[in-house]
Amino acid sequence: MAKFPLFFVLLGVLTGTSGFAEDCRLTSLEMSSSQVVVQATSRPQFQELDFPQKGLFCHELVFPKTVLALPNRSSQGLSTTLRSIEVVQFSAHPNVVHIVLKQTITPHYNVVVEPQGQQYRLTITWSNSANNVFGKSQARLFKVFLDVGHGGYDPGGTGPAGLPESFVNLDVAQRVAAILKQHGFAVAMDRTSDHFVSLADRVKLADDSHCQLFVGLYCNASRNRSMHGTTTYFYHPVAKKFAWHLCNVVARDLGLADNGAVFDNLYVIKHTPATFPAVIIEYAFISNFHEEALLADHHFRDKIAQAVAQAIMTYR
């Protein structure tokens, strides 16, 4: 049996804790016909489940090690398709909270977690379109600019086994562009082959494209080979929401660590107009032995593209 110093034993007696991290607490809740917003004392962890029930399509979020610091809540008949939302303390010891949405259709759900001061805000939204919240007609009016990192004599980061970042970025970008075009989006790119494009030219090309969304596609790299996971970067406030959304979706779909959205004055996102979201995503660390091996696999690069495209198509 592990032995703890007397100080920590006494601290646990005095504070009513055992010295371990406290469970996450959900402290406020807002529900409407289009979203659920929850405030949490720490970053909430959850799993999503889908199942049928009496002719309805149920979407459930299960929060382990979580306390609902509010009475159980249930709202009925919020719209013609949304029959109910239930937020309940499913069990205690262990503490588990369930959020269940019941609908007459099978919408696409999107869950974004972002910091709010010392707490976190979790937002659940949904769309009646299974694939695209814009819908076909609106998608045709929407142009996405893909900034394809590095290229030509600038290979970007190079993995321990020699994989060049510029190759990964171009391959992912071409896959993302193909998916978006299939769904009716207009797409512009600052390079479609292995050639160098200056940072200033990237910004000018984006501005001239009259896009509504700018996404830089890059790998991360560090001298510390243990660094890993997905990170996004933004500069203008208008891009913050999409940066968090993009990071959440891609990290979740790839099964990588979610490093969150980071404010940074990187050239291309700082100098693009502040009239539309401009973000950079670094989907994985090419300097990490394991993640370089993933990036070298074309199946994994296809997963990256699918996740990035899905994040774009479900952003609103």
Image: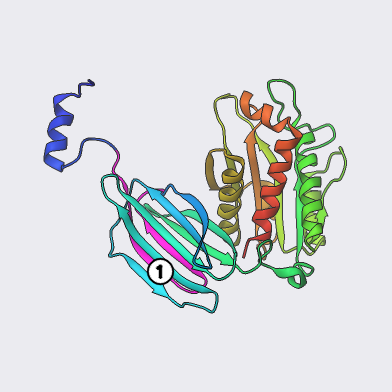
When asked about the image quadrant of residue 254, the answer is top right
Residue at 28 percent of width and 63 percent of height: 70
Residue at 48 percent of width and 73 percent of height: 83
Residue at 44 percent of width and 64 percent of height: 37
Image coordinates of residue 263 in percent, x first then y, are 55, 49
Q: Can residue 313 be seen in this view?
A: yes
Image coordinates of residue 156 in percent, x first then y, are 74, 33
Residue 118 is a magenta residue: no
When asked about the image quadrant of residue 126, the answer is bottom right
| Depth check, front residue: 92 or 269 | 92
Residue at 75 percent of width and 41 percent of height: 149
Q: Which amino acid does label 1 sit on?
A: Glu
Q: Can residue 236 be seen in this view?
A: no
Secondary element under disc 1, as helix, strand or loop, is strand
Q: Is the magenta stretch mostly helix, strand or loop?
A: strand
Mark 1 residue crowding within 10 angstroms, few (<14) / some (14–19) / many (20+): few
In-image side of 4 versus 226 (left or right): left
Which quadrant of the rendered structure holds the C terminus? bottom right
Q: Give the range drawn in magenta.
A: 21-43
Image coordinates of residue 98 in percent, x first then y, are 39, 56
How was the colour assigned to the protein in this rendering? Answer: rainbow
In-image side of 58 versus 29 (left or right): right
Question: For mark 1, what is the residue?
Answer: 30
Which quadrant of the rendered structure holds the N terminus? top left
Image coordinates of residue 85 in percent, x first then y, are 43, 68
The single residue placed furthest to the front in the displayed view is 54
How many numbered dots are placed on residues in this image? 1
